[in-house]
Image (cartoon, rainbow, N blue to C red):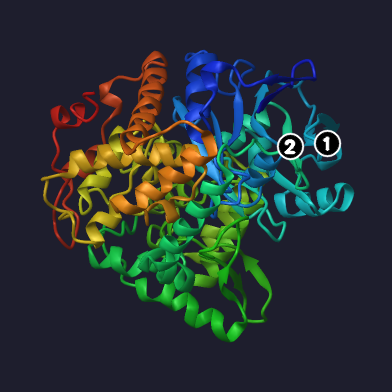
Amino acid sequence: MKFIRANMSDQTITEENVPNNYIGLGGRGLTSIMINNEVPPQCDPLGPDNKLIFAPGLLSGTTLVNTSRVSIGAKSPLTGGIKESNVGGTMGFSLGKLGINAIIVEGKAPQGELKFLKIDDQGKASFVQAQDYKSMRTYELVEKIHKNFGKKNSILCIGPAGEQEFKVASIQGSDTEGRPCRAAGRGGLGAVMGAKGLKALIVDQGGKNPDPVADPGTFKESSKVLTKIINEDPFSGNMLPNFGTPVLVAPVNSLGAFPSFNARKGVFDGWEKISGEAMAEIQGPRGGKMKHMGCTQCIVHCSNEYVDEDGKYITSALEYETIWAMGGMTGIDHLDTIAKLDFLCDDIGVDTMSTGVGIAVAMDSGYKSFGDRDAAIEMVEEIAKGTEFGKILGQGPVAVGKHFNNERVPAVKGQSIAAYDPRSMIGNGITYATTPMGGDHTAGNLVGAYLGQVLDPLKKEGQIETSREIQFFNAAADSVGMCLMVYASLNSPEAREVFLNVTNAKLGPELAVEDLRSLGERILKAEREFNHKAGFTKNDDRLPKFFYEEPLPPHNTVFPFSNDELDMMFDF
């Protein structure tokens, strides 16, 4: 159990045992509580006082399935508040196998300097000059890193957008094939990495010193039961392997909640052309993969490998949120184009969601026409080139709206919403407004409750309570390193009990279900405390005005919750 602190200012690296106040924390719990403790809330997110923290989940590096995620935390340059963005691929497992609980990147390299932080198979860290890799896009970058340092390395890196410190810059993670197609996209944390002068984190995959498992026998047996539960769940065991997250395109459209044409409509007329079913139909004859293991330890295989008409690789994985942002929001109903846009975003290193929404705002403003494929591709390329418009788009959708004097920007705390309109899925609107993370669906997505008919997505009853509870449990899930796609299958009391058995067998202490909720509550309190000290008020927990005023077709409803009701969300 150790922390590695890497100071970019003086190029020193120190190791320390995990302090007592951080023991038992991992992932988002560790990043958020550490940021609240150690980062000055009023600091410049791109200055030396901010910290960039990489923390695998508590169960990452174990034999438990689907626990390879790593949380990345910092003060966000996009929202101005606390941010955690997590990513799959191989890094979480690699850090866990080395017994590294967190890497804390501090300070800021001298202007113009660029470094790699490399960790060997013994867990020893060192800085490596990276000047020769300056301005390199991520696919070329990882190819050269693997050539020069070996294929058996996990990589988190930035592209030109991160080096230019653009607020929608992502941190790209390598998948099981070694490609930088997994993204910690939200919040502009790639800009923080770029500002510190860190081009890539490179970690050897051969570690053999994981934190001990307190009760190996119970851990093994409970893991088997948990695996069976995941495999037998209709969503994680059937729908996701066959269609991936794009399986949501059809049902969300059916609910009238698929924000399209910059959220002017709730149904996209061309949805059939960009659905998960359409992707499977297109990719079958081409030789693309609808079942792909993108992350270490994954048994769901919800990833895909999208190829062109000649069978040539375009991107992996083409996800639901990207299809929405680059498709429905922009009026583009052509999957090949959306796949190319996804690749460009990964290669340049930007969040597909905030970038797609920024493009939609520009189109809504008359800069280009909705549905213009070539224009969308050129706009993303402009970010890499650093053109005048590229610099605006690179700062996020709010900046685009200000440039065109367009107030119809679907963003909260500076970050775009996700692929669920808050006028047709009103509980998701509560999550967007109240999470400390900005317009973030992973903080507490109610789509499962709607599709399972547990809640009516248009009626107020139960929405606040459900959003609150999901936010608590998702914060806890982000702390253990488990993929939310799998965590969603653990809704029954029996499944939660098995999950607790696994967690207790790993850590030792006897946790109960209420302790998971308490962990989530503790995390949310720390995040809200940081944002309050950073200057956030209750007025930041609001949706854009047009969601309250413009009825959304086809239901012609608006977001119904008052400010007073939103302010009651976290009365705990």
Among the 4 quarters of the image, the one containing residue 500: top left
513 with respect to 396 (left or right): left
Which residue appears at 13% of the width and 56% of the height? 556
- Quarter placement of the C terminus: top left
Depth check: give the residue in front, 304 or 212.
Answer: 212
Q: Position of residue 277 (x, y in %)?
A: 42, 77
Q: Position of residue 292 (x, y in %)?
A: 59, 68
- Which mark sits nearer the N-terminus, 1 or 2? 1
Residue farthest toward the bottom in the current orientation of the protein: 285
Density class for disc 2 (Cα within 10 Å; few <14, some 14-19, many ≥20) is many
Q: Real-space Cα distance between discs 1 and 2? A: 7 Å
Amino acid at dot 2 = Lys
396 with respect to 288 (left or right): left
Question: What kind of element bears circle 1?
Answer: loop
Marks 1 and 2 in Cβ contact (< 8 Å): yes
Residue farthest toward the front in the current orientation of the protein: 217
